[in-house]
Image (tube, rainbow, N blue to C red):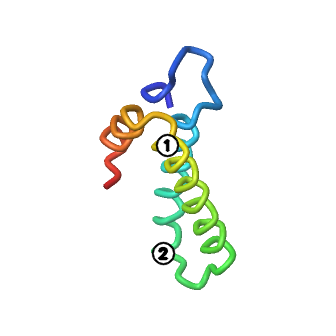
Amino acid sequence: MKESQVHDTDTGSPEVQVSLLTKKIESLTKHLQKNKKDVHSRRGLLQMVADRRKHLKYLAKKSPKRHASLLKKLGLK
C-alpha cells in the first residue's frame, strides 16, 4: 500500500484501492485452490475482480500514465 500511495495519508486513491484488492485477490485465490467447493468465497472473489477492473478502467480514463505505472508495479498484464 505504501508503494502506491500518492501522499502519506492516502487511503482512497484508485492506486491504493487496486493494490489492496490485488492483495486480497491473491490470498483468496490461494484459499480457493485448497477449498475447491467454497462457492461463497468464489463469488466474493469474482466481485473483487470486477471491482478492481472498474477502478483500473477509471484510472486509465483519468490518467493513463498513472495507470501504466500501477500495472507495472503490481505485475498485472
Looking at the image, which residue is at 65% across and 31% down? 12
Horizontal and vertical percent position of residue 58: 55, 45
Horizontal and vertical percent position of residue 59: 50, 40
Q: How crowded is mark 2: few (under 14 residues within 10 Å), some or many (20 or more)?
A: few
Horizontal and vertical percent position of residue 60: 45, 43
Q: Which of 63 and 34 is in front in this view?
A: 63
Residue type at mark 1?
A: Lys
Q: Nearer the viewer, residue 27 or 65?
A: 65
In this rendering, the answer to whether 22 lies above or below 38 is: above
The residue under label 2 is: 34
Q: Quadrant of the C terminus?
A: bottom left
In this rendering, the answer to whether 38 lies above or below 51 is: below
First in residue order: circle 2 vs circle 1: 2
Location of residue 48 (image quadrant): bottom right
The residue under label 1 is: 61
Separation (CA) of disc 2 from disc 1: 37 Å
Mark drawn on residue 4: none
Give the farthest residue toward the bottom: 37
Looking at the image, which residue is at 48% across and 25% down? 2
Looking at the image, which residue is at 64% across and 71% down? 41
Q: Which of 30 and 8 is in front in this view?
A: 8
Location of residue 66 (image quadrant): top left
Looking at the image, which residue is at 59% across and 31% down? 13
Tell me the SS state at disc 2.
Answer: helix
Q: Determine whether, in the image, residue 49 is placed left or right of residue 77.
A: right
In this rendering, the answer to whether 42 lies above or below 54 is: below
Residue type at mark 2?
A: Lys
